[in-house]
Image (tube, rainbow, N blue to C red):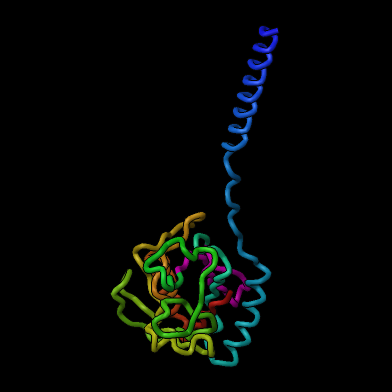
Amino acid sequence: MKRIYLLFIIFLVGSCSQERNSNTIITNRPLAAEKKPEADLSKIKSKAEEALEFCDSKNLSKDFCILIDMSLHSGVNRFFIWDFKNNKISKKYLVGHGCGSNSWSKDNSKANPGFSNEDGSHLSSLGKYKLEGRGYSDWGINIKYLMHGLEETNSNALKRYIVFHSWDLMSDEEVFPDGSPEGWGCPTVSNNAMKEIDPMIQKSGKPVLMWIYN
């Protein structure tokens, strides 16, 4: 009888051990990789159509405009140069946004940035801007464009010193699932991106529209 009881105990211990090992295997399975978000081309086309009408009414360049979709993760390309003449995206880049209270962050708001028109908020502002006034920047390749806010949501852009410039920390390639470096509200691109964009703006003949939307 004692021998049967002992065998029963050994059987229970072995079963528990197998169950515990089985649970460990399940628990240690790797999590599925985060899916990289893609730009919605139909949304971009719709914005471009509205942008062309706006440029026509405000005497802005009808060669191209800049569309920035802040609903996209900051680690993927969300800065689009839209070619009005050929009705397509001609170039696309990474672009940084404001860090808010998370000083010089890279990942805190990579997928869900905040927005504000308030001075000192260190957040980006949504809305349409006129890029007019090329000057010297302490950042990147030392070129900046003044951003004249054309809506209530970005009317304080000049007062806040929100300008379009490049930044050494910005990558030329997508960095997802990481985010792009976050500054104090300026839309920032890589140095190589600015080297391509700057001549386009200079040759445009008229101020260029930059539209930041969510």
| Picture residue at 45% right of the left edge, 68% below the top | 96
- 156 lies left or right of 25: left
Q: Is residue 85 magenta?
A: yes
Quadrant of the image containing the N terminus: top right
Magenta residue check for 115: no
Q: Nearer the viewer, residue 100 or 126?
A: 100
**For residue 23, above or below residue 183:** above
Q: Quadrant of residue 49?
A: bottom right
- Depicted 181 relative to depicted 12: above or below: below
Residue 97 showing in the rendered view? yes
Say how many tags the image has: 0
Spot occupied by residue 85 in the image (x, y as percentages of width and height): 60, 77
Quarter of the image where one finds residue 181: bottom left
- Above or below residue 82? Residue 117 is below
Left or right placement of residue 6 versus residue 121 in this view? right
Q: Most extreme residue toward the front, as rendered?
A: 1
Residue 161, x across and y down, in percent: 37, 83
The residue at the point 58 percent across, 74 percent down is 214
Query: At 48% from the left edge and 84% from the top edge, which residue is drawn?
Result: 117
Q: Residue at x 36, y 62 (%)?
A: 169
Percent of width and height locating residue 73: 54, 63
- Residue 45 drawn at (x, y percent): 65, 73
- Asked whether 9 or 56 is in front, the reply is 9
The magenta-colored residue range is: 77-96
Task: Tell me if residue 195 can be seen.
Answer: no
